[in-house]
Image (spheres, rainbow, N blue to C red):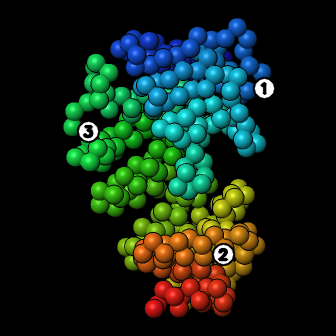
Amino acid sequence: MAKKRRDDEHGLDRILGILDAAPPGLHDLDPPGPDLPKGLPEPLIELYARCDGGRIFLDTIEIAPARDVTMPTPARWRFATIEGDAISMDHRGKIWRNDEALDDEICDGTRIDKWLSGVIDATALLYDGDGEFAEDIFDEEGELLPAVHERQLRAHLKRDPAAPGPRWRLAHALLAQGATEDARNELEQAVADDSAFAWAWLDLGRISERLGDIGNALDEIRMAAETAEGVQHEQAGYFWAQLARLASLTGDEMLRAQAATKTSLLAPTLKAAQLAGARESLDAGDTASAKGLLDLLKAVWPRDLEVLDLARRIAT
């Protein structure tokens, strides 16, 4: 245990030394305060013993001062942001990144030193030796090139290979580039590293469904639903709804009904949210998105009057 503690401390010292040697103005870390905060996880205390927050790569990564650490959810200490996403640490020292699109937190690092090393190496790919943006990293519209984003995620994983979040995002980056098999391999590694990573199980199921492998798709989406329920995930009902949708497509009425019952019990507000989303999509002219939401609604609430009315509206 003592050796591990020394290794962790050495890792933080190495990271801060690299930041200190960077071009002036690229990073701005505040000196540690006179009193270490109480009640924080030990890895956070070790960080604040070295600096009292600051900004890394201008304001891409911001570490809050110790006094500003909050706990918006139980046993999760929010201490930083990266590209605007909130970053928290749990009582085990794991790092969690808020994903606004999912309305969920994804495990972004296994330890703070590995996480910091990973995000620093990933972000460094965007800058040249003078602290300016590197050439040939953005497209004509100012968006980061997919290949650059992929290199960033691989750089992060080189520092923290067991972190499921960066690997899951790498899978999505590969899917966006048409590398389906490579994406599947990354997702399989993600669930091997974290078997309770419901979003990765769901994405595996979606890939299998897209490839026509319905048997595997059912197994993988069932794993997503069962693991989400097992860890009392706030969106467990949504995963069961996805299983109901796929069971409906395959004609497995017993499984559809079982999954629909789970959905209703675990997500009593899901129907209203999905209906609102579908109507909003229709009003915006996005019929495809509305149909996708309708498929899920019909699988869980096939005789609901509001769902039937929505189906008629989409059909006309």
The amino acid type of the residue labelled 2 equals Lys
**Badge 1 is on which residue?**
39
Relative placement, left or right, of 294 versus 209 is right
Relative placement, left or right, of 264 versus 306 is right
Asked if residue 198 is positioned above or below residue 117 in the image, the reply reads: below
Residue 147 appears in view: no
- Residue at x 66%, y 75% (from the top left corner): 271
Residue 151 appears in view: yes
- Residue at x 69%, y 58% (from the top left corner): 234
Per the image, label 3 sits on a secondary structure element best described as loop
Q: CA distance from mark 1 to mark 3?
A: 42 Å
Per the image, label 2 sits on a secondary structure element best described as helix
> Where does the image place residue 259, in percent across and percent down from the top left?
66, 77
Q: CA distance from mark 1 to mark 2?
A: 40 Å
Relative placement, left or right, of 208 versus 275 is left
- Residue at x 67%, y 88% (from the top left corner): 304
> Where does the image place residue 157, in percent across and percent down from the top left?
43, 38
Label located before the other in sequence (2 or 3): 3
- Residue at x 40%, y 59% (from the top left corner): 184
Residue 137 circle label: 3
Residue 271 circle label: 2
The amino acid type of the residue labelled 1 equals Gly
Label located before the other in sequence (1 or 3): 1
Asked if residue 65 is positioned above or below residue 101 in the image, the reply reads: above
Q: Quadrant of residue 241?
A: bottom right
